[in-house]
Amino acid sequence: MDISILGLGYVGCVSAACFAKLGHHVIGADVSEKKIALINAGKPTIIEAEIGELVKDAHDKGLLEATGDCRYAVHHSDVSFIAVGTPSTREGHLNLKYVYDVAEQIGQALRDKEGFHIIAIRSTVLPGTNRKVGEIIQAASGRERGTDFAVVSNPEFMREGTSVRDFMNPPLSLIGTDSELAEATFRELYGGLPAEFISTDIEVAEMIKYVNNTFHALKIVFGNEIGNICKALNIDSHKVMDIFCKDTKLNISPYYLMPGFAYGGSCLPKDSRALVTLAHDLYVNTPVINSIEPSNELQKKAAMDIIESKGRRKVGILGLSFKAGTDDLRNSPIVDVAQTLCGKGYEIQIYDKNVCVSQLTGTNADFIAAKLPHLHEIITDDLDAVCRSCDVLVISNREKEYCDIPERYPGKYIVDLARQFKELDYDGSYEGISWGSINVNANQNMALERDMPSTDF
């Protein structure tokens, strides 16, 4: 395949050399005459393990060349990668000038180029950039997106020092696209790599790199804060974290990483508070660990804000325990939401088949007595009664018996805190706590009629 890579910095140079190693013909383009000269002499533009041998080999085989002429690069390729820098501004925003400048040049080059052309954004950019790049190219070229060209998002997952190895052995190959032709092209392009190929929404692909890097930064800081606490206690922090990382069922795993409602129960709130207190007593500053509980409280407030936004007085809560399949109410986050709703004058009904008020004992009974002393008056094991009489249904635990609620009770406002549904064609209003509407019904965006004003205390 014929490829052009616009920008011969770190990402562009490594991508060019590795695509050539996969057998593709690559044209690199850059404004720097020095970088162009280096590539055309069979030398890399960066210092990196293995890159020198790859660039020389590609150059010697006639698979890699460089130019300062963007039009030439676009006209002699089927796919153009945008791989220019996106530095931070003084305010912390991304400077997308170079991305947009290249998009303008691609658009001008496409004015008199025949055939369908694919533009891939390799640079790390925020959601919405792909759409803007498409608009720039469309305006500059006079061509139609989807008919004459496609813009895809194709983030890279390379680390400095091991970038060649990372390119050739990636965790996955990801493309965000709205074009079937572009997807098929990229499946062929990355067909030689030993990784799962994932095609997804453009905005999802644009978001992934920021999620990855922020989580990596979070892991480093978390490990350092644990290390600082351990040092103050004369504990070997590396032994602690080595054992921590051996748990691939919960610790190093997808578990707990799905967006949803706040955490609760008898362990997480108590033990995270204890660690915060321990660090405080040791005079160890742990801002990341300290922020865990306040962030959890914000998620409870987010649930309240969504419920209140529906403007309805009668609210049914489906599931009161902190986890599906249990009767444990201790520190259940939905209990706090129910308590706040009661205090604001909402008419609350609660369904939970696992909770029998008369059988609650010990700390479970003490907790609920302090939070909802009249729980016995508003809780029931009759799901139908709650769903029929309430206007807003709040799903706090994922249960099979909730799957057909939209069909059985049309027109209700559904607030989903557990991602009970993945797709929903529902004649009513649906909203998830940490995801947008998945309701495909056109009535979803109609104005809400309120029977209760929002209140602030």
Image (cartoon, grey):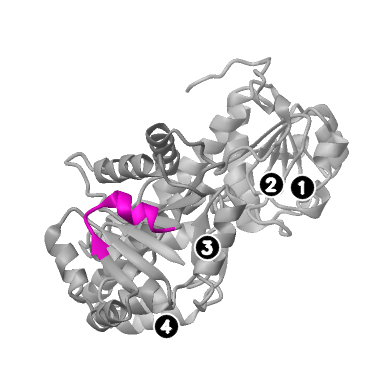
Crowding at dot 2, Cα within 10 Å, few <14 / some 14-19 / many 20+, comes out as many
Q: Please name the residue shown 47% across and 23% down the image.
A: 457
Contact (Cβ within 8 Å) of mark 4 with mark 1: no
Which quarter of the figure has residue 33?
A: bottom left
Q: CA distance from mark 4 to mark 1?
A: 38 Å
Badge 4 amino acid: Ile
In the picture, measured across the screen, residue 163 lies left or right of residue 365, that is left
Give the residue type that dot 1 points to: Asp
Residue 243 shows which numbered tag? 4
Residue named by callout 3: 186
- Secondary element at tag 3: helix
User: Judging from the image, what secondary structure is the residue with disc 1 in?
Assistant: loop
Label of residue 320 in the image: 2
Comes first in the chain, label 3 or label 4: 3
Is the residue marked by circle 1 packed among few (<14), some (14-19), or many (20+) residues within 10 Å? many
Q: Amino acid at mark 2?
A: Leu
Residue 170 vertical placement versus 70 (above, below): below
